[in-house]
Image (cartoon, helix red, strand yellow):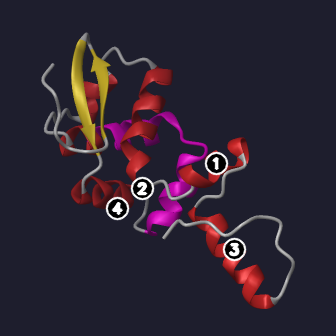
Amino acid sequence: MTEDVHPHTAHIVIDGAPRPLRLTLGALAEIEAAFGGQGFDAIVARLKAPGAGDILIILEALLRGGGAGLSREALMASDIDLATAAQAIAAAFGGLAPDAEEEDTAQTGAPGKRDAGAQADRETAGAPSGATPSSAP
């Protein structure tokens, strides 16, 4: 497998062959259309409890984005580990996760970008703060 120069490219093994998954604008639009065209928030909500059909739709779009397009029919006939597919999809969507830093905050106590914004809001409102201001943009 060659080194991928695109950020946020994940890989999945399908039928023994590694394939790149990339969330491109086209892939995102394809997923959005397949999920009813209700926007990114609807996609995020649906990804919290995806069905097998949702996973196939997402894999098909991400594979096409990564340049390794496989049809949904080919994916249905392929050997794909469900847990690995879920991890690869999450990795491909990782570049869009504004809450990833917030999750780190919950685990480490270090403020993330949203925490810094909330901190600034509390300070502006005159509420006592429990943390020092963050240097995050």
Task: Tell me whether the residue at label 2 lies in contact with that at label 3, contact meaning CB atoms closer than 8 angstroms.
Answer: no
Local secondary structure at mark 4: helix
Which callout, 1 or 3, points at the residue further toward the start of the chain? 1
Which callout, 2 or 3, points at the residue further toward the start of the chain? 2
- Give the class, few, some or many, for how many residues have Cα within 10 Å of label 4's Cα (few <14, many ≥20): few
Q: Which residue is mark 3?
A: 118
- Give the class, few, some or many, for how many residues have Cα within 10 Å of label 2's Cα (few <14, many ≥20): few
Where is residue 90 shown, x and y percent of the image?
46, 39
Q: Is residue 15 above or below residue 57?
A: above
Q: Is residue 123 left or right of residue 33?
A: right
Give the position of the N terminus as an image quadrant: top left
Q: Is residue 82 above or below residue 104?
A: above
- Give the class, few, some or many, for how many residues have Cα within 10 Å of label 1's Cα (few <14, many ≥20): some
Q: Which mark is residue 33?
A: 4
Magenta span covers which residues? Answer: 38-60
Residue type at mark 4: give it. Answer: Ala
Q: Which residue is mark 1?
A: 103
Where is residue 43 shown, x and y percent of the image?
48, 57
Real-space Cα separation, disc 1 to disc 3, in angstroms: 15 Å
* Most common secondary structure along the magenta stretch: helix
